Amino acid sequence: MTVNMRRLAGSALVVGTIVALAGYLAANLLAPGSGEEVFRYQNWPLFEGIALVGDVVVALGLPVILTFAGRAPKLHIAGYAGVFAALVMLNVGEGTTEAFVKPYLAGHGGIPAQEPPGFAAFEGVALLALVVGSICLGIAVLRARTLPWWIGVALIVSCLLGALGLPGAWFLVPDGVFFAALFAIGVFAVRGRPEHTPATAGQPAAGTRG
């Protein structure tokens, strides 16, 4: 990836994470009530639609993660694949249902209590991809040492927080931590950090951070 392409991809991560998180926060913090009632909020489709746009932009910039592979290229690839799959399946795929389909159903007889056949399996695969991808990418960042260690920790912590099932608006915290980590990766890509090569003869790659 050329320097200009990497900066463009990094900018996509920066802009996409800000837009997506802003959309999610607006939709979930401003919508009154809970459960099916939130889908009747008049601005829900707007805010969720903004989040969807941000998610698409993040997906376009996500390949820049691979330029920081350093000494852990396989883990970076596994992490990228898992995060990308989860982003497309959950944030974009299921997010489209949350943004437009459920509000329509809520205003036309109510949302069915039973989910469509196969939806649970689809969601389960996406969640597994998110868990594997976040943990692999977090470990990869820690091993490669081409990015600050706290970015790797944040990716892993976001996954652990998500598994806790935080109540109320606190459920947005894992997404916030996750997007913050991707935002930081985008910032380092935009700043034009040189690409790193795997370490040889027991020596760290040039330009790595301890």
Image (tube, rainbow, N blue to C red):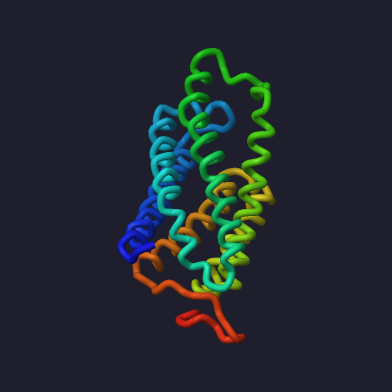
Q: Is residue 175 above or below residue 4?
A: above
Q: Quadrant of the N terminus?
A: bottom left
Q: Is residue 162 above or below residue 97?
A: below
Q: Quadrant of residue 123?
A: top right
Residue drawn at x 49%, y 72% is: 147
- Image location of residue 36, percent across then percent down: 57, 26
Q: Quadrant of the C terminus?
A: bottom right
Q: Is residue 21 visible?
A: no
Q: Nearer the viewer, residue 85 or 156?
A: 85
Q: Is residue 5 visible?
A: yes
Q: Quadrant of residue 5?
A: bottom left
Residue drawn at x 60%, y 56% is: 78
- Image location of residue 9, percent across then percent down: 37, 56
- Image location of residue 101, percent across then percent down: 50, 24
- Image location of residue 21, percent across then percent down: 44, 48
Residue drawn at x 58%, y 20% is: 111
Compared across the picture, whether 25 is left or right of 143 comes to left
Residue drawn at x 59%, y 69% is: 72
Q: Residue furthest top?
A: 109
